[in-house]
Amino acid sequence: MIWIALGGIVLLEIAGAVLCWIGAGKMWAARGSAATFTAAKRMAHLGLGVTACLYFIGFMAIAQEYFLMWQNEQINVLQDAFRMFASAALLSLWLSADD
């Protein structure tokens, strides 16, 4: 079960990164037209959403509450998970701003 959970986490991290890179590539290619650029943001939003959900739901909610990760000083990754969640959320807000 642990290896399946770890594999799921790694696959979600890879999916979020790939979606963000695809979105960044589409935005770079569409930088000449404002309407096309705005439409190209969709994939980057999806990647940031996957990343934010992974770190918020997976680490800050499930790992903190069900596995009591906050009690363990050696594997307490909640600060790192919050930093990744906050980064994805802030980047998504910045990406949502008008150009």
Image (spheres, rainbow, N blue to C red):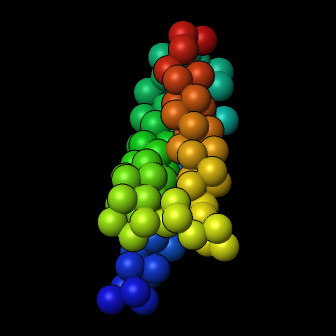
Q: Residue at horizontal 65%, vertical 21%?
A: 32
Q: Is residue 74 above or below residue 55?
A: below
The spot of residue 38 in percent (x, y) is 49, 22
Point out the image quarter for the C terminus: top right
Q: Residue at horizontal 59%, vertical 22%?
A: 94
Nearer to the camera, 61 or 38: 61
Dividing the picture into quadrants, the one containing residue 90 is: top right
In the image, taking residue 75 as reference, residue 6 lies left or right, namely: left
Point out the image quarter for the N terminus: bottom left
Q: Residue at horizontal 57%, vertical 37%?
A: 86
Q: Is residue 55 visible?
A: yes
Nearer to the camera, 75 or 4: 75
The spot of residue 35 in percent (x, y) is 48, 17
Furthest-front residue in this view:
71
The spot of residue 76 in percent (x, y) is 60, 64
Nearer to the camera, 75 or 56: 75
Q: Is residue 23 visible?
A: no
In the image, taking residue 85 as reference, residue 56 lies left or right, namely: left
Nearer to the camera, 36 or 77: 77
Q: Is residue 27 above or below residue 95?
A: below
Q: Is residue 86 above or below residue 70?
A: above
In the image, taking residue 1 as reference, residue 51 lies left or right, namely: right
Q: Is residue 32 above or below residue 80?
A: above
Counting the numbered discs, the total is: 0
Furthest-top residue in this view:
98
Q: Residue at horizontal 59%, vertical 32%?
A: 91
